[in-house]
Image: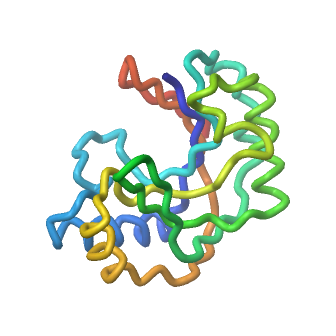
Amino acid sequence: MFSVELSPDAELDRAVRDDWDRLLAADLPSSGRNPAPSNRPHLTLAVRDRLDPSAFDGIADLLPITLELAGVVLLGHRDRYVLARHVVVSAPLLAIHRVVAEIAGRPEPRYSNTGIDRWTPHITLARGLTAPRLATAMRLMKAPNFVGQATGARIWDADARRVTTLR
């Protein structure tokens, strides 16, 4: 599995890591629990089973773009939830998403939520929260609007555990 991701600037990165740290301090699931150097706050633009990283070289030319975090968004699957910071939709963000989605091609059904006109921009804070743990996590979230920039782009190859930096 491959994902094409935008990386936030240092201030947005720190704001998300602060959320991760609050969850960790409460012994809740947190994306900050992963100690791998490749683990960092990111905005996923596309996920596909196969990608040619070299096809995305021009994406770096579209950066930087403004990113605004606003509140939280919940994504559910059965009895577990993903807690994420909502990223406000803007014309530049939709434009870069469209370019990436077109290069990536039609998503496989399980990744259809990263396709054009089906995408919910977000930065994940925690996965696998039960309803009671979600309630605790929500009490910890401050979630102020925060404006920064997407300054980097990368491709994550989950099978090889390798990052290809585009910018």
The residue that appears at 61% across and 54% down in the rendered structure is 151
The residue that appears at 62% across and 75% down in the rendered structure is 147
**Quarter assignment of residue 108:** top right
Asked if 148 appears above or below 51 in the picture, the reply is below
- In the rendered image, residue 127, in percent from the top left (x then y), is placed at 35, 52
The residue that appears at 25% across and 69% down in the rendered structure is 132
- In this picture, residue 63 sits left or right of residue 154: right
**Quarter assignment of residue 137:** bottom left
Asked if 117 appears above or below 107 in the picture, the reply is below
Tell me how many marks there are.
Answer: 0
- In the rendered image, residue 24, in percent from the top left (x then y), is placed at 20, 65
- In this picture, residue 37 sits left or right of residue 117: left
Asked if 71 appears above or below 155 in the picture, the reply is below
The image quadrant where one finds the C terminus is top right
- In this picture, residue 95 sits left or right of residue 164: right
- In the rendered image, residue 100, in percent from the top left (x then y), is placed at 74, 35
- The residue nearer to you, when weighing 82 against 105, is 82
- In the rendered image, residue 128, in percent from the top left (x then y), is placed at 31, 51
The residue that appears at 35% across and 52% down in the rendered structure is 79
- In this picture, residue 51 sits left or right of residue 92: left
User: Which colour scheme appears in the figure?
Assistant: rainbow
Asked if 126 appears above or below 14 in the picture, the reply is above
**Quarter assignment of residue 48:** top right
Q: Residue furthest front?
A: 78
- The residue nearer to you, when weighing 45 against 75, is 75
